Amino acid sequence: MDFAFSEEQQMLRASARDWLADRYPLDRVAAISDGDLGYDPDAWAELTKLGWLDESLELTDLAVLCEEAGYGLLPAPFVTTVALAAPAVGSAERPASVVHDGLAPDGAAVELLVAGARVVEASACTITAVDSVDRLRRYARVELPEADAGESVTSTPDAQLRAGALLACEAVGVTQRALDLTVAYVKQREQFGRVIGSYQAIAHRVSDVYVQLELARSLAYWAAWSVEAGDPQAEVAVAAARSAAGEAALFGCEAAIQSHGGIGFTWEHPLHRFYKRAQWISSWSGSATSQRAQIATALFGD
Amino acid sequence: MDFRDTPDEAEFRAGLRAWLVEALPPGWQQQPPHVGRWDEDTARTWARKLYDAGYSGITWPKEYGGQGQPYTYQGIFLEETARVGAPDHIGVIGLGMAGPTITAWGSQEQKQRYLANILSGEEIWCQGFSEPGSGSDLAGARTSAVLDGDEWVVNGQKVWSSYAHIADWCILVVRTDPAAAKHAGLSYLLVDMKSPGVEVRPLRQITGDPEFNEIWFTDVRVPRESMLGQPGDGWKVAMTTLLHERGTLGFALTAALERAVNRLITTAKETGADSDPVQRDRIARHWVELQALRYTNYRSLTTLVKTGVPGPEGSVAKLHWSESNQRLTKLAQELLGERAMLSGAGGYWDGYWAYQQLRSRGNTIEAGTSEILRGIVAERVLGLPKSR
Ligand SMILES: Cc1cc2nc3c(=O)[nH]c(=O)nc-3n(C[C@H](O)[C@H](O)[C@H](O)COP(=O)(O)OP(=O)(O)OC[C@H]3O[C@@H](n4cnc5c(N)ncnc54)[C@H](O)[C@@H]3O)c2cc1C
């Protein structure tokens, strides 16, 4: 039994964290989020150069990158590509997303779209941006040119599992950032002559976020490993990870907003973008409750 | 990253499984779960069996009766014994607290004298930390020890001491220097519970069982060399006792929770709650919480094996387990409805769930209250300023 990332994976994490902090400080992320596109069109070439889209990356490597992408709110369709679309497309070389009920997250930011069992060039579709809560992962309405457009693909059976595991990792990154922002703030903000982090009502809630985060992190890594290794528990591991990591991210962001007071409720402060990402992750393809329903089926049958 | 057993681990697991089938009475797993603590005889006999088979002190040094195996083996042992609901070793305090502290701080003679007897269950230990005036604030302890010739003379009162009524020895925090600052005046003694002047009075818990006790010390004479560390080291030694939890306690807690989740699932099936979507959701949540605890322990343990220090995430185990266990037992009671209110032979599983729910209320108090543990996470892990 060995539950640790390899040295290479730890280096990958450190370099991803540094690159994101350097290339996309939170004020730049805010500007992109408030801009017309909601993503940085130059990012893809850089991600390619960094090796984030290499075919050689294992799922646990991508787990590290998706977590860091969540931590930094990487303004590019990276997670949608590697987590949602790549298993059907067969590679992550070009930015891609998936269409559900005519809607695709990052739909206007990608070149390829997976619709059912087909992969279509985005340029062949009619794509209309739609107002979205998470302005760094905006939805677009997608009209396919005709029913049999594009290439037909057979998605690998573990596509849903890969997606679930990687989104859980992204959620862990979001929660970690919400926690870090909160810890930094409550250590310096003073009220009634004391820093607010010395009040237990604040400190204990922050501790609760840490607990939920660490539990979700364990599940998310377990899920990524189980899918990579083809473990028989992969399905329940992913359901557990998605339900716990989604809820932890929501709780972590909510606690962060509360601990910041008024400033946490402003558009200006970065917290709301993490919160909206947490909401997006939780909403995608089945709620935490529906994940647990899957687990209940595994425990009890239908 | 690889969660599978190594070939050596797999062999150890297989050997243990086979041994458990032999060692437990026939039909063991078909019986309803045991209510309350194990009686002394069962627990002692079981401890001896474990010891003779080499399953006691798996990670302890060989020269003191242990097996010198890696921590992962201890994890496997706890998983497998939980799976079959095996009884607990009687020496919980000795194994989890006194032993590791003696290993860390004791002299060669002390290790020789005490450790093997803990493993075999021959000698039982209790913990004398809490006092009527100081529980969470352990450093406020007032029980005194004064040197007289070659002996410490101990006077004072300890309270809530589990197992004291059957214990042979006590790890005791005493004040040896009343003039020194609060923490610096403490020392750590190993006290023979059969010494003249030691009086134990059982206290009845909300479960009805007398499991913990008051201990009164009146001019109890303790040999000078029965101290761990030097006079004034008591706080540091006591921290070793308390922090040892971070090692493999998480595995014991996971094992206990796994047993509870499995029993909850059985109860759900027997009461028909397994077809109610609301209850299915709540039970699935407990299953998720169990896996989260399990894999967090694995993570902490991997850090411990690689660096010698458990990862900070280990600090969440007891906090999470205690609250999860309270919710779980309450849910089980709810599934039973009014039937949950019958104890003894008339009740479901002899009133097992009612007992478990009542006992679980102590989980967030013993070994550091949840409030104290949240403070530790905030201050030591996250670096927030002290609240006091
Ligand atoms: C089942 C059981 C077994 C036990 N076994 C043993 C044993 O074997 N040996 C032993 O020495 N002790 C034992 N204890 C005692 C246990 O360690 C103490 O009960 C515990 O440390 C709390 O101390 P207290 O009871 O004095 O409560 P207090 O410390 O008075 O706490 C009362 C309440 O105040 C809260 N509180 C206290 N300080 C703070 C603070 N700074 N911030 C916020 N809240 C605070 C607590 O969290 C709690 O909710 C056992 C207790 C139980 C329930």
Image (cartoon, grey):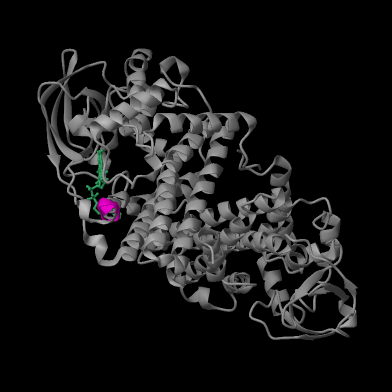
Give coordinates of residue A113: x percent, y percent.
82, 74
Magenta stretch secondary structure, dominant: helix
Specify whether A150 is left or right of A96. right
The answer to whether residue A214 is left or right of residue B223 is right
Residue B187, horizontal then vertical, whole percent: 26, 28
Query: Percent from the top left, x then y, of residue B318?
Result: 40, 47
Image quadrant containing the C terminus of chain A: bottom right
Q: Which residues are magenta?
A: B349-356
Q: Is residue A78 above or below residue A36?
A: above
Q: Residue furthest front?
A: B26
Asked whether B258 or B363 is in front, the reply is B258
Residue B170 magenta-highlighted: no
The residue under the point 44% across, 26% down is B55
- Determine if residue A111 is in view: no
Could one spot residue B366 in this view of the protein?
yes
Q: Residue A18 versus residue A135: which sits nearer the camera?
A: A135
Q: Quadrant of residue B216?
A: top left
Count every numbered label the image shows and give the total.
0
**Does residue B86 appear to the left or right of A84 in the view shown?**
left
Q: Is residue B353 magenta?
A: yes
The residue lying toward the viewer, choosing from B141 and A195, is B141
Q: Quadrant of residue A246?
A: bottom right
Question: Which residue is drawn at the image coordinates 58% and 29% (left, top)?
Answer: B11
Q: Quadrant of the N terminus of chain A?
A: top right
Picture coordinates of residue B170 (x, y %)?
A: 24, 28
